Image (cartoon, rainbow, N blue to C red):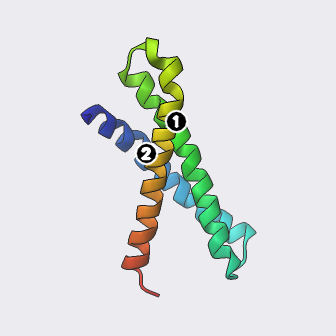
Amino acid sequence: MMLVAIIYLILGLPLSIIIDKVIDKLMNQWFTNSKSSVWKRYLVGLSLYNLAGILVGPMILVTIFDPVIYETGFWIFIIYGTMASNIYYHSSLLIAKIWVKD
């Protein structure tokens, strides 16, 4: 279990920082400050965090487990990685909403 936490810290934290910078850059270049831009920002962030979960999830399978379970466990770890990234993304949105009151 500790190895999983280390993998998520080593891969997940830098990916999260990169994703946040990409979201800010995309929002500044492509979208205006309209009400629909809030939803666009959310959807872009959700898509990028899902992609990160799809990339990080199988890394845990490759690092920890025996190669015999690669075929059956591959899709399960993609789902786990996506769920973990969605939980993190929505938690960070909630914390940002509570922390910065408009």
Q: Residue at x 36, y 23 (%)?
A: 64
Q: Quadrant of residue 24?
A: bottom right
Q: Position of residue 44 (x, y in %)?
A: 64, 60
Visible in this render: residue 24?
A: yes
Dot 2, how many residues are within 10 Å of its Cα: few (below 14), some (14-19), or many (20+)? many
Visible in this render: residue 14?
A: no
Residue that sits furthest to the bottom in the current view: 102
Which amino acid type is marked by label 2? Gly
The numbered mark at residue 64 is: none
Residue that sits furthest to the left in the current view: 2
Marks 2 and 1 close (CB-CB < 8 Å): no
Q: Position of residue 9 (x, y in %)?
A: 35, 44
Does residue 101 appear to the left or right of 74 in the view shown?
left
Front one among 59 and 66: 66
Which amino acid type is marked by label 1? Ile
Q: Residue at x 60, y 66 (%)?
A: 42
Secondary structure found at label 2: helix
Q: Quadrant of residue 92?
A: bottom left
Q: Earlier in the sequence, mark 2 or mark 1?
A: 2
Observer-side mark, 2 or 1, equals 1
Total count of labels = 2
Vertical arrangement, residue 102 with respect to residue 28, above or below: below
Front one among 85 and 10: 85
Q: Residue beneath label 1, please?
A: 78
Vertical arrangement, residue 82 with respect to residue 68, above or below: below
Q: Real-space Cα distance between discs 2 and 1? A: 14 Å
Vertical arrangement, residue 57 with respect to residue 48, above or below: above
Does residue 48 appear to the left or right of 31 in the view shown?
left
Dot 1, how many residues are within 10 Å of its Cα: few (below 14), some (14-19), or many (20+)? many
Does residue 52 appear to the left or right of 61 in the view shown?
right
The numbered mark at residue 12 is: 2
